[in-house]
Image: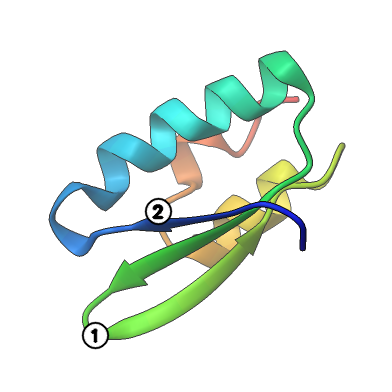
Amino acid sequence: MSNCRIIPERSAFFKLKKIKQTAILRDLKEDIILVLNNRVDLICWRKKKVSRALKRGGKGSSFKNSK
């Protein structure tokens, strides 16, 4: 967990979308902390595990088929 990002609740989905694209394009390995409904969910970005992480985030259905 060398890199972490905290995403505020009000802009979480938009930033999650942008960070997901950036992370894949640059092949980053970083942990993203998503804050929703006063709960903190840790979304781990790892190569070939992004769809699973997004599903865990609860709003990843639109990204599910992405590689």
Q: Earlier in the sequence, mark 1 or mark 2?
A: 1
Whole-percent x and y of residue 54?
57, 52
- Left or right? Give the position of 10 relative to 33: left
Q: Residue 25: x, y in percent?
A: 69, 14
- Residue at left offset 86%, top offset 38%: 48
In the picture of the structure, the residue carrying the numbered disc 1 is: 38
Q: Decide if residue 48 is on the left or right side of residue 32.
A: right
Q: Is residue 50 above or below residue 66?
A: below
Other residues around mark 2 within 10 Å, as few (<14) / some (14–19) / many (≥20): few
In this view, the mark in front (1 or 2): 1
Point out the residue furthest to the right here: 48
Left/right placement of residue 1 relative to residue 40 reads right
Q: From the image, tell me which residue sits under label 2.
A: 59
Which element type, helix, strand or loop, lies under badge 1?
loop
In the displayed structure, 33 sits above or below 29; it is below
Horizontal and vertical percent position of residue 22: 57, 21
Instruction: Single out the residue that lies furthest toward the bottom.
Output: 38
Q: Residue at x 21, y 62 (%)?
A: 9
Return the residue found at the far left.
10
In the picture as drawn, the residue positioned furthest to the top comes out as 25
